[in-house]
Image (cartoon, rainbow, N blue to C red):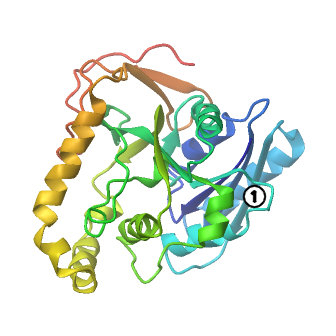
Amino acid sequence: MKFWIVTPTFNSLQWLPQCIRSIADQAQEGIEIHHHVQDGGSTDGTAAWLQEYSDECTRQQPPNYRFSYASKRDRGMYDAINIGWALAPSDIDIIAHLNSDEQYLPGALSKVAEAAAQHPRADILLGTYIILDKNSRYIAHRRPVPPRVWSSYYTCAVITNSCFHRASAFRRHGIRFDIRWKSISDMVFYSALARAGLRFQTIPVVTSAFYCTGDNLAWSEASWKEGTEYARHIPWWASKLNPFIYRWVNLKRRLADIGQPAPREYAVYLPHTDVRTTWPIHHPTVCWGFRTTSSEPAGETLADS
């Protein structure tokens, strides 16, 4: 199965190498990956680092893995993703994007490929993700909740790092990020997909790690301002029911966790490392509460993998 993964980045060199490594090590027999990084013209050395990495990939030619990048000004993160997605060739099976401060977990894309084969009618696959603090310590995990038309206008129950689009449906519906929105385009995007009748399928796979640094775009002042403006463009009842919808989605997340095995460990790349470090999860929980630091007890990591 062939994957096309896009990473938008801008002045995020402290995170980007780990993100790239987490994608590169997914390649194996039967899993072909092309990773494209769309840099918005960073000034922190990102372009030079990307050129070095690209040259290294050209020299080594790792099996089933290809890498490309472009570095030029864009109109924001969502524009960069759209640009990268537009480059996907016609023979790709799955399209996704992973932000520079996120990582795929070991074997994630192989498991996504298996799920795609098991659910041939699914247009979009949704996996579980774990939330980490800036020191890579576990905060919580979140199960996927498929967006519904009535609930998606004002609440985004999907996160992009654990969302995988079947390429045939992706091209057919033609819905992309609306770059008018600089902070809330995720919510607008998934709401549009739900209204278009796309078929979402949850899968019992922990695919990704989301780093909660406190500087995430969705928590910015710009995001709150855009949310206020966006409320003027949606049905009046969606705004009135938003508190109920928000609680309903959280309840669905908790119910989705029942009967599924809790994650007990995870393995991610740390800065300046070429192998993953495995961390134990002592108290798995789906309760995030928008904390930015871990409540897990301090302790040593497990062996590197």
Is residue 42 at all visible to an observer of this figure?
no
Whether residue 110 is situated above or below residue 244 in the rendered picture: above
Asked whether 223 or 3 is in front, the reply is: 3
Residue 56 position, x and y percent, is 80, 45
Q: Which residue is mark 1?
A: 68
Asked whether 223 or 127 is in front, the reply is: 127
Whether residue 190 is situated above or below residue 229 in the rendered picture: above
Point out the image quarter for the N terminus. Answer: top right
- Splitting the image into 4 quarters, where does residue 61 fall? top right
| 246 displayed left or right of 10 | left
Please report the residue visible at 79 percent of the width from the left and 62 percent of the height from the top: 89
Please report the residue visible at 63 percent of the width from the left and 41 percent of the height from the top: 23
Residue 154 position, x and y percent, is 25, 68
Residue 72 position, x and y percent, is 65, 76
Please report the residue visible at 26 percent of the width from the left and 62 percent of the height from the top: 151
Whether residue 240 is situated above or below residue 211 in the rendered picture: below
| 153 displayed left or right of 201 | left
* Three-letter amino acid code at the position of disc 1: Ser
Point out the image quarter for the C terminus. Answer: top right
- Splitting the image into 4 quarters, where does residue 90 fall? bottom right
| 18 displayed left or right of 25 | left
Q: Secondary structure at mark 1?
A: strand
Give neighbour class at mark 1: few <14, some 14-19, many 20+ (Cα, 10 Å): some
Which residue ends up furthest to the top in the rendered image?
Answer: 303
